[in-house]
Amino acid sequence: MLWSDPENEPPEELRDTQDMLRRLSVLLAMAMVLAMVVIGVR
């Protein structure tokens, strides 16, 4: 990184999209764990 390089800040839309994808991936992981537990109980 050079001192003259611009700040590496993503735009607002990209940050919002990344937050949404992060929440979605956490939700999907929880759903998969719940599904495994339900399958394991049967």
Image (cartoon, helix red, strand yellow):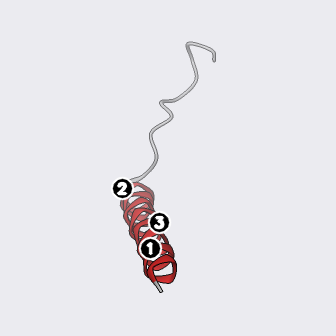
Specify few, some or many for label 1: CA neighbours under 10 Å numbering under 14, 14-19, or 20 or more.
few
Identify residue type, mark 2. Glu
Marks 2,1: beta carbons within 8 A: no
Residue 24 figure quarter: bottom left
Rounded to the nearest angstrom, the CA distance separating label 2 from label 1 is 38 Å
Q: In this view, does 27 lie above or below 38?
A: above
**Toward the viewer: 18 or 12?**
18
**Toward the viewer: 23 or 41?**
41
Of badges 3 and 2, the one in the foreground is: 3
Q: Is mark 3 on a helix, strand or loop?
A: helix
Rounded to the nearest angstrom, the CA distance separating label 3 from label 2 is 26 Å
Task: Report the residue marked by disc 3.
Answer: 29
Identify residue type, mark 3. Ala
Q: In this view, does 26 lie above or below 39?
A: above
Q: Which residue is drawn at 36% across and 61% down?
A: 16
Q: Which residue is drawn at 44% across and 80% down?
A: 41
Which mark, by number, is residue 19?
none
Task: Report the residue marked by disc 2.
Answer: 12
Task: Report the residue marked by disc 1.
Answer: 37
Q: What element carries label 2?
A: helix
Q: In this view, does 18 lie above or below 32?
A: above
